[in-house]
Amino acid sequence: MTVEGFRYLCYLENIHMLAHVPAGEAETLVRIVSLLPSATEIVYALDLQDDLHGVTYACDYPSAASDKPVVVSSRIQDATSSGEIDRQVKDALISEDGIYVLHLDTLEEARPDLVLTQALCEVCAVPSQQVHETLAKLPHVPEVISLDPHSLADVASDVAKVGNSAGTDEAAARVANSLRERVDRIESSAAKADTRPRIVCLEWLDPLMVGGHWVPEMVELAGGVDCFGKPGRPSFVVEWEQIVEAKPDVVIAMPCGFDVGRGLSEVRALTGKPDWDELPAAKTDSLFVVDANSYFSRSGPRLFDGLEILAEILHPELFGGLVPVGGAFRIFGKPF
């Protein structure tokens, strides 16, 4: 048989094999498992949802993510207050079991090639050591990408990172560039503001914690001055007396993982604290509750919606129509 004849037979054999491959599987696909909600949102933003075969119990956006197999569950029970949640978390952190359960059987069924996780916060997601110990038990150990952003630029870079690993470089570049452009638009418009109000962003209410990492940066980009937080630094506990001394013009409650309704159930306790009425924020009815679970806690694409929400809260004279339905609520003041 000639070389040309052999090549032709190989060609026919390839055609025959492809004809028996189910639709959508003729090319190599990356099977993805996400161990944090923000990574799940990135996967959907890149239109890779068909390649997603495992998520966490908290992956609820887009709503279709709730139908994916759950590979992570939490030992923290749904509590009635911030203080009770804080107690459960502290107890879990010092126990041998930890906060999260990583389900090996579901991971085995998912057969991941790529696992998306983080090492930024052991409270927010499965700790890295637990992830690697569990994945080492799989027949095929997948690639692990840790998404650990400290800024909005890092989030955009994470989008590109996930896209590169999943083979969708061009789509990832488009999404990441779109996010960067939104930041530029807000920053450019906010720079025209005549004032820069002093802001306190409360990431937790019992104990009181001020927002860290990307939150202080978001405040600055939106035209405000964060009274406590430093861009890129973690959140930390403050005393009420420190907030009184800071004299904020605006107080924004963004309890980690809470939506507006859950935040409202607790934030009114602030108005009963000593010297609340003396705060500039109190005198102008500038106490806000935002949907932190959607727009501030998760380091995914919707953080950029959060930036736009902050911009409208701080400078309604420059921004309008940026707050999504249910995204923020002004206590005692005119609703959005």
Image (cartoon, grey):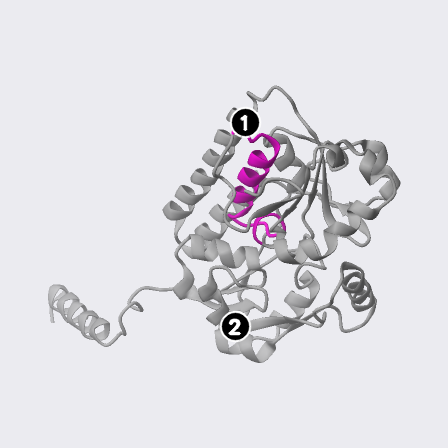
Residue 90 percent coordinates (x, y): 81, 63
Mark 1 is on which residue type? Answer: Glu
Name the quarter where the N terminus is drawn: bottom left
Please tell me which residue lies in front, 154 or 123.
Answer: 123
Mark carried by residue 160: none
Classify 186 as above or below 269: above
Q: Is residue 22 left or right of residue 147?
A: left
Residue 118 percent coordinates (x, y): 63, 56
Q: Kindly identify which residue carries mark 1.
A: 317
Q: Is residue 103 left or right of residue 189?
A: right
Q: Quadrant of residue 191?
A: top right
Using the rendered image of the protein, determine whether residue 31 is visible from the camera's viewpoint: no
Label 2 to label 1: alpha-carbon separation: 56 Å
Please tell me which residue lies in front, 77 or 290.
Answer: 290
Q: Kindly identify which residue carries mark 2.
A: 140
Using the rendered image of the protein, determine whether residue 125 is visible from the camera's viewpoint: yes
Mark 2 Cα within 10 Å, few/some/many (few <14, many 20+)?
Answer: few
Mark 1 Cα within 10 Å, few/some/many (few <14, many 20+)?
Answer: few
On whether residue 296 falls in the magenta region, the answer is yes
Specify which label sits upstream in the sequence, 2 or 1.
2
